Image (cartoon, rainbow, N blue to C red):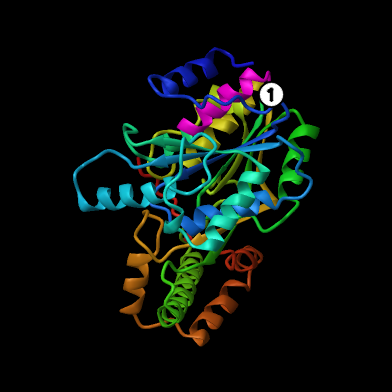
Amino acid sequence: MLDTRASAFVRKRLQDVSLIETPMHKHCRVCVVVPIYREPVHRVVNLLVSLARQQVLSEGDIEVLCVVNNGPDDGTNAWKAVKQSNALVMDLPLWRNSDGFGSHLRFPTEVLEACSEVRSVFPVYAINEPELATGTVGEARNRGLAEAAVRFDRQGKNGLVIFLDADVVIDDPNYLSQALRLFEQDKEIVAVSGGVKLVFDPDTRDETERLRLDALVERFLRRRRYQFLERFRQGEATRLMPSDAFVGQHILARSADAAAWQGFPDWKSGEDTEFGNRAKQYAMQEGKRVIDKKVELTVVNAIRDSDRTGASLKWKLEEEASLTPVSEESYARLESLVAASDEGRALVDHIDEVARIVWDDRQKV
């Protein structure tokens, strides 16, 4: 099943690492790959519970590979914080390939019950890679993809791999059945850029602080929309996220094909866009198809107020707090001017999609 290109990718990514010993279930059709980097326990658990509550799941349909990524040890306090957070995640009573779990006294009852629910539905495996060469999200996704490709190949399958971020939740109970139907009915599809609905979810639990941050986020988003409209009015490029952009929070692909086009670049961001570019080039060469967006396949992703990744909002909200807010009147006046043309109306119609206006088109290796 794996051609020479895919085999080379797998060999490179799995050299000198320990593979999961438990074989994939013979009925498995979906492998979900989730990179975990300094992720709060409740977010990891919430994602897995949302997967466990999918409708029409038969025994063995799905397994989950969580790539727990500390990144290289640079001796900094930041790295120590990542390691400590990841260690807590590793203590969860979740992992099918763990010899034992951390003390259950570390977790509240609702977390333990959620873990029990997940374990009763599908296996979750931890790929604990403390020393990935770069520690980038691209490398972490590739580690999961390579193992998924091997596990499917041993079953004689070019199976469906779904890449999700750890702070994603699937709110549609029919999501998996729709995804499987799409790939099983059209064998020419090799990759799909899934939809993402962004919802602000502060890391803090303090209600007063949450209200303050909510207000700042609304101000920030209005300013972003205003900037896009003003760029358009001035005849400049808006840099609105393209409708065909792949976003790492939610990507679907066939395992052997994704390995053949060498998966993701080992970048800290922009790796998702390049994955989509590679998929499209591969599909063109092989006479296959890539679907840019499937709006019925949408997940919910948290906008964060932390500085956990470059995409987090911490510094942007700090900046927003020091600026004079864009008034509703000013925004409405500019929106009316832009909407006077058909092209401007199309921009206005899309500018409320949060994912499209917070997207950053600058690739960082």
What is the x, y in percent for residue 317?
37, 71
- Residue at 59%, 32% (x, y): give it: 280
Could one spot residue 195 in this view of the protein? no
**Label 1 element class:** loop
Residue type at the position of mark 1: Gly
**Magenta-drawn segment:** 143-157
Q: In which quarter of the view is residue 62 placed?
A: top right
- In the image, residue 102 sits, relative to residue 351, either above or below, namely above
Depth check, front residue: 16 or 277: 16
Q: Work out whether residue 61 or residue 182 is closer to the camera in this orientation and state it.
A: 61
Please name the residue shown 66% across and 45% down the image: 120
Is 149 a magenta residue? yes
Magenta region, main secondary structure: helix
Count of marks overlaid on the render: 1
- Is residue 159 shown left or right of residue 94? right
Quarter holding the C terminus is top left
Would you name the residue on which mark 1 appears? 287
**327 sits to left or right of 135:** right
Label 1 neighbour load within 10 Å: few <14, some 14-19, many 20+: few
